[in-house]
Image: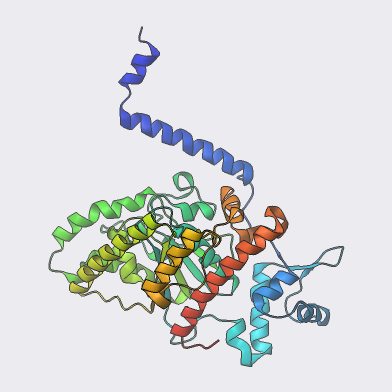
């Protein structure tokens, strides 16, 4: 009879790792189902009239008067008289205000007009832990709250962005349902619209990710050998070509890039109209970013030599997980501003226990009320998020020729 120890020795390393991964996936699914049972749909909360007034840019008293006069969407009114709106109603309100106050139409309803090009924003850095996914999530949701139609693309095989939208990669994302399905090289490729799915957050659609994305990294070298001399088949054009299929459906595309400069990232860089480089203000992270920029420059040169064009409307550096009270961090931020000047966003994404705690349940602060995480920490975190998003939205508006 074999001992338990000898049985473990017989199991291969790959089998053992697979067994552990499957056990963890099942446990995570069970945890997720306790928070969001299979019979329940993850949904976005309603917003108080005060929150809506801040989001839309009018006074709470003005909203109250609209409600009394029966103008615009009718809010839900509680027994205590408190008014609340769903995000769908917030968008209805935007449409109403754009019509009722035509001189301010762009402020209330900022979506693309004829001639405005789709904005494709990549969030990138090849170092893990620089808050790429958090930045992508809050940017996508912040844009949707302002009335934009957003497509989020998860290009990271680890699929953290997908998880934040309530999708567990191992169970909820079928084969050929990631961006790989729309950019693969064989006859199984599908139209882009087949890999886009709606989310619980009105205004946001997502192309989810999972480990299937690694197939593009594996298949591309062989394809490059087979299609040498045919520029229309160059791998880095495929992401842009897929996005072009849904160009008319969205105002902004936000791409959460993987923490590596592989073929997927090169495709995203070629598709982008703007780039946000996230960096944690620690010396090791800044040094790593220096290498990232040098490697990115080399890769962009390769793309340009092959006939690609990367005429970005903007490239900005975003300081993330920032503790403004930390003196060494202040010095590093000052160094970045000295080197990169106005290419560093004025706003920084502050380190926040509120954001971290919300992430533990795969939620963003937009999904939670102030009281659920503490009003003061919630307000500080939201101030930081709003500051970052407002700067990026202003960059988009400038590309579309809009003043403040």
Of residues 350 and 133, the one drawn nearer to the viewer in this rendering: 350
Residue 241 place in picture, x, y as percent: 32, 70
Q: Is residue 187 visible?
A: yes
Q: Image quadrant for the N terminus?
A: top left
Residue 256 placed where, x, y %? Answer: 42, 61
For image coordinates 61% across by 87% down, the residue present is: 105
Number of marks: 0
Indicate whether 250 appears above or below 80.
below
As drawn, is 55 to the left or to the right of 48? left
- Looking at the image, the residue that sits furthest to the bottom is 103
Q: Which picture quadrant has residue 365? A: bottom right
Q: Which residue lies furthest to the top in this view?
A: 1
| Whole-percent x, y for residue 262 in the image | 28, 57
Which corner quadrant of the image does residue 104 belong to?
Answer: bottom right
Task: Judge from the rendering whether residue 314 lies leftward or rightward of residue 64; answer left or right.
Answer: left
Residue 360 locus on image (x, y percent)? 57, 48
Question: Residue shown at 39%/49% (left/top)?
Answer: 175
Is 366 placed left or right of 131 in the picture?
Answer: right
Residue 315 visible in image: no
Give the quarter of the figure containing the C terminus.
bottom right
Is residue 161 positioned above or below 104 on the image? Answer: above
């Amino acid at each position: 009879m074999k001992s338990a120890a000898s049985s473990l020795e017989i199991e291969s390393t790959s089998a053992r790792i697979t067994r552990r991964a499957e056990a963890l996936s099942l446990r995570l699914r069970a945890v997720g189902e306790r928070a969001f049972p299979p019979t329940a749909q993850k949904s976005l909360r309603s917003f108080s009239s005060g929150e809506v007034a801040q989001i839309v840019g009018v006074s709470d008293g003005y909203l109250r008067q609209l409600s009394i006069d029966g103008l615009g969407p009718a809010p839900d009114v509680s027994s205590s008289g408190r008014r609340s709106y769903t995000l769908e109603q917030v968008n209805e309100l935007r449409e109403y205000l754009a019509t009722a106050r035509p001189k301010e139409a762009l402020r209330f309803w900022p979506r693309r007009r004829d001639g405005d090009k789709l904005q494709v924003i990549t969030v990138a850095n090849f170092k893990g832990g620089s808050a790429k996914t958090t930045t992508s999530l809050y940017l996508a949701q912040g844009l949707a709250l302002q009335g934009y139609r957003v497509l989020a693309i998860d290009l990271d095989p680890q699929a953290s962005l997908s998880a934040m939208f309530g999708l567990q990669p191992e169970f909820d994302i079928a084969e050929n349902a990631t961006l790989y399905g729309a950019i693969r090289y064989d006859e199984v490729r599908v139209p882009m619209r087949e890999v886009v799915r709606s989310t619980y957050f009105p205004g946001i659609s997502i192309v989810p990710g999972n480990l299937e994305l690694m197939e593009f990294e594996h298949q591309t070298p062989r394809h490059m050998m087979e299609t040498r001399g045919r520029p229309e088949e160059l791998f880095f054009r495929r992401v842009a070509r897929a996005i072009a299929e849904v160009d008319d459906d969205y105002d902004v595309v936000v791409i959460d890039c993987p923490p590596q400069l592989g073929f997927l990232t090169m495709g995203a860089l070629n598709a982008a109209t703007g780039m946000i480089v996230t960096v944690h203000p620690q010396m090791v992270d800044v040094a790593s970013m220096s290498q990232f920029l040098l490697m990115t420059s080399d890769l962009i040169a390769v793309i340009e030599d092959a006939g690609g064009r990367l005429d970005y409307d903007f490239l900005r550096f975003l300081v993330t997980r920032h503790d403004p009270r930390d003196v060494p961090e202040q010095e590093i931020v000052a160094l970045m501003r000295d080197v990169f000047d106005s290419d560093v966003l004025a706003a920084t994404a502050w380190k926040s226990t509120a954001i971290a705690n919300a992430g533990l349940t795969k939620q963003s602060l937009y999904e939670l009320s102030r009281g659920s995480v503490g009003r003061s920490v919630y307000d500080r975190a939201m101030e930081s998020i709003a500051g970052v998003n407002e700067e990026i939205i202003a960059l988009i508006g400038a590309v579309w020729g809009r003043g403040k």
